Image: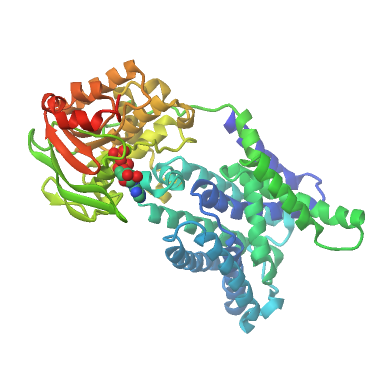
Amino acid sequence: MRRAFLLAFVVALAAMPLLPVPEFWITQANYIGLYTLVVIGLVLLTGIAGLTSFGQAAFVGLGAYTAAFLTLKYGMSPWLTVWFGLAFTAVAALILGWITLRMSGHYLPLATIAWGLSLFYLLGNIDALGKYDGLLGIPAIRFFGIELNTGRSFYYLLWIIVVLAAIGVTRLLDSRTGRALRAVKGGATMAEAMGIDTYRTKVTAFVIAALLASVSGWLFAHFQRTVNPSPFGLKMGIEYLFMAVLGGVGHVWGALVGAGVVKILEDQLQVWLPKLLGGSGNYEVIVFGIVLVLVLQYARDGIWAFVEARLPRRDRAVDWADAPALPERARPPHGEVVLDVKAVRKEFGGLVAVNDVSFSVRAGEILGLIGPNGAGKSTTFNLVTGVLPATRGEVRLMGERIEGLTSRAIARRGVSRTFQHVKMIPAMTVLENVALGAHLRGARGVAAAMLRVDRAEERRLFKEAEKQLRRIGMEASMHELAGNLALGPQRLMEIARALCADPTLLLLDEPAAGLRLKEKQALAATLRQLRGEGLSILLVEHDMDLVMGLVDRVVVMEFGTRLIEGTPEEVQASPAVRAAYLGTEH
Ligand code: ADP
Ligand code: MG
């Protein structure tokens, strides 16, 4: 069905210039194609990775001016200049991304505004680039001896590139890197805990978006045959973002819809509004502003979301049955100390959340960490997994110190975890969410995804994901969107995701919260089985029945301090523990 739509679209696209369509509409279509390229980049950057940029027009400008300057000044072939443009843009995007993407929040949008403005004034003040008049007389692109100097001939080159870009980005989204890109939007903590380098992933999205804009600029220069700074200023940067939001910022095909609607609407409004309102002015800007507010208010996901909701959802074909299993980590011998926490401390200002706590976990053992709310259990987890830096103390994994490492580096060494408050990507299927856990067991990147040569690895990752879902009894829900699950299954899904990393040490933060009795029993059985396989588990849990019947030893915390450590029987018999729990627990 989807393929049929795509095919119909491509056929209609290919047929349009052959029909007696007025030149005006061919020109419109060409502009829409040029814009779509830029907006596809924005979908990736803003919709998928959650990074807002007002500066894409500046990257279009870089591509356009590089093409114009090199062809006019040095007589270079456009087929050569495009590579210069891409290289130049990549360098600019890397530098800009390197500086701004480390900062959080609103720095990136602000930086892109600054960048958009400054490039505009820079272009307008360089003599060699013709200042605000720009460069004229850019030659047309020649393609196998054919000069693409008409709207109709240019159309084909342009739209082939647009369709390839759309397919490439669609493929990218359905890949290991694509899942990483989606994961960074929800915040770095979960993604990093799965071993994803979120900074690098953001830079990747930023550079790809810039490169798409640059190609659009290259095409633009040879289509218009002249460049000047005005199409590359901030106003256009905002307009690109508007197209992305209107079309549907999370969808590749939304880019096309957004670009199409805005371009056509703009032209019609420029004709009709002055007639209606009298005089001349940029009235369409006002209309766009109002439309943007309405879209953000009532249709946040843009126009494409309406189409998407009506298209049949196609489950991922289960094509991994024969895929070879992923290699597994060597497990430490039973009884060996896996995790050794020594006098670890965490202060938040004056509050001592974890007060010189020590404990160790051995291979093939489940250690329970219990204590009233606010005792410091989750904070201890965050210290062990590198989410928070310890104020002092030592954490050793298999004898090596890890307390200074990033959570990504710790994940790589075999520590995987779940979160007290489920962290997942609601718009991805359960299977894809779980596959995220196997990120470090794959290696394929952007190019492999776009060329679809990553499928063998993908099959192995999905096979692993399915295996772990089966383990927790959730294989029936693998094609569901994670966001549609109830809380209990969401928690189980997180466990499957953590297991996908093939960890040596598994940390579970209140895994049974929100689970029904049957689910709890199944969970306990799974954890026992994992222990039998030699996995070490650190378990924070409020459900005493579950904890006491399951764990080998218990550490009780209160007000950040370790109260007692012992077997479940010893702990249950302790008067101090009873005192700590009275009134605060069941
Ligand atoms: P538990 O998981 O045992 O319920 P937490 O580890 O979440 O407890 O919290 C321990 C204490 O540290 C609580 O008093 C909590 O308010 C405080 N705390 C946790 N995280 C932070 C933070 N990021 N900043 C300041 N205080 C925090
Ligand atoms: Mg907690």
Q: Where does residue 174 sit, x and y in percent of width and height?
A: 46, 40
- Residue at image x 66%, y 52%? 242
Residue at the far top in the pictured view: 518
- Of residues 272 and 562, which is closer to you in this image? 562
Outermost residue toward the bottom in this view: 127
In the rendered view, would you say 560 is above or below 139? Answer: above
Does residue 105 lie above or below 6 as drawn?
below
Residue 245 shown left or right of residue 277 in the figure: left
Q: Describe residue 575's horizontal placement relative to residue 219 as left or right.
A: left
Above or below: residue 296 compared with residue 61: above
| Ligand 2 falls in quadrant | top left
The type of colouring in the image is rainbow
Q: Where, quadrant-wise, is the C terminus in this rendering?
A: top left
Q: What residue do we see at 90% from left, 56% from top? A: 277
Q: Position of residue 544 (x, y in %)?
A: 24, 24
Asked whether, in this view, residue 353 is left or right of residue 107, the answer is: left
Give the x, y percent position of residue 142: 63, 63
Q: Is residue 322 visible?
A: no
Q: Is residue 64 left or right of residue 467?
A: right
Q: Position of residue 315 (x, y in %)?
A: 48, 27
Front position in the image: 451 or 541: 541
Q: Looking at the figure, which quarter contains the N terminus? A: top right
Q: Nearer the viewer, residue 248 or 27?
A: 248
Vertical placement of residue 175 versus 309, above or below: below
